[in-house]
Image: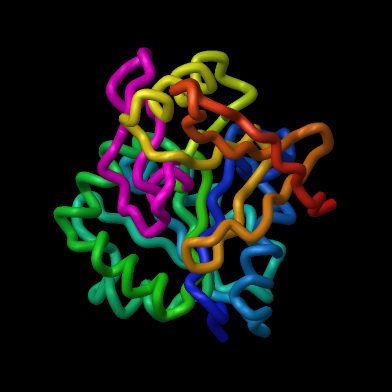
Amino acid sequence: MTATAPTVLATSIGFDSRGRGPYDWSPGPVFDLAFQLAGDPDRPRICHLGTATGDEPTRIAGFYGAFAARPDVAVSHLSLFPMPTVADVRAHLLAQDVVWVGGGSVANLLAVWAVHGLDEVFREAWRAGVVLAGVSAGSLCWHVGGTTDSFGPDLRPVTNGLGLLPYSNGVHHDSEVRRRPLYHRLVADGTLPPGFATDDGVGLVYRGAELVEAVADRPGKAAYRVERGDDGAAVETRIEPRRLR
């Protein structure tokens, strides 16, 4: 099954930790939401891309480990280093119900994807009803741009996102103190278009180019609409999320 409309699930939500190591994960409720958005297939197919961390093997293993107790989910991954791990990248991605993109360097991710033509493949997959999802860099990439530490410890704008969504995106809005003021400034001065930001634990659900809801896996968190006001300053409007659990 596929989503009934082009769908993106852009989040500041990672896995739940089981506490026995840095990649000892369990899938949180955001993944069940992704499968619901894909039409609730009997055995959803999810493909993990860890491009943003250079296809780090331990993170990929963590993804498989997270779903080890979920035989009802068909898990795969696509690595691009040193070469693609599947013979036909386009066919593999189009066969998925959900694509999950991990966090890391969004600038490097976008550059590597462009080399392999994934920018066009993802646009095709999005139109075909594959749910495109991810956290941090895996949230920013679907938008026009946002703020990133891809270039070093000082945050900078990234403006060459895939642009499936005609907005900017702010991630980790509450947990990294420099994110919010820089995002506000970049929207106010026109470097970035208006957009949406997420606290840690919050995700954005888009159908086509429309934000339809915010969701959260913990209390006290929110999403935000950020736009340029009439006086040239950024205006932030809180969006209350629906709790996933």
Residue that appears at 40% across and 35% down? 146
Seen in the picture, residue 194 relative to 184 is either above or below; the reply is below
The residue drawn where x is 26% and y is 55% is 80
Q: Main secondary structure of the magenta part?
A: loop
Taking depth in this image into account, of 7 and 118 the one nearest to the observer is 7
| The N terminus sits in image quarter | bottom right
Q: Is residue 6 visible?
A: yes
Q: Residue at x 29, y 38 (%)?
A: 159
Question: Can you name the residue that lies furthest to the front here?
Answer: 230
Is residue 137 visible from the viewing direction of this image?
A: no
How far across and down, in percent of the image, does residue 54 sit? 31, 41
143 left or right of 117 in image: right
- Identify whether 201 is placed above or below 76: above
- Toward which corner of the image does residue 236 lie, by quadrant? top right
Residue 29 location in percent, x, y?
Answer: 74, 55
Which residue occupies the extreme left position in the image?
Answer: 115
- Residue 212 percent coordinates (x, y): 64, 60
| Nearer to us in this view, 125 or 104 | 125
The residue drawn where x is 54% and y is 61% is: 210
Asked whether 149 falls inside the magenta stretch, the response is yes
Provide the residue span drawn in magenta.
Answer: 139-168
Displayed quadrant of residue 222: top right
For residue 177, above or below residue 97: above
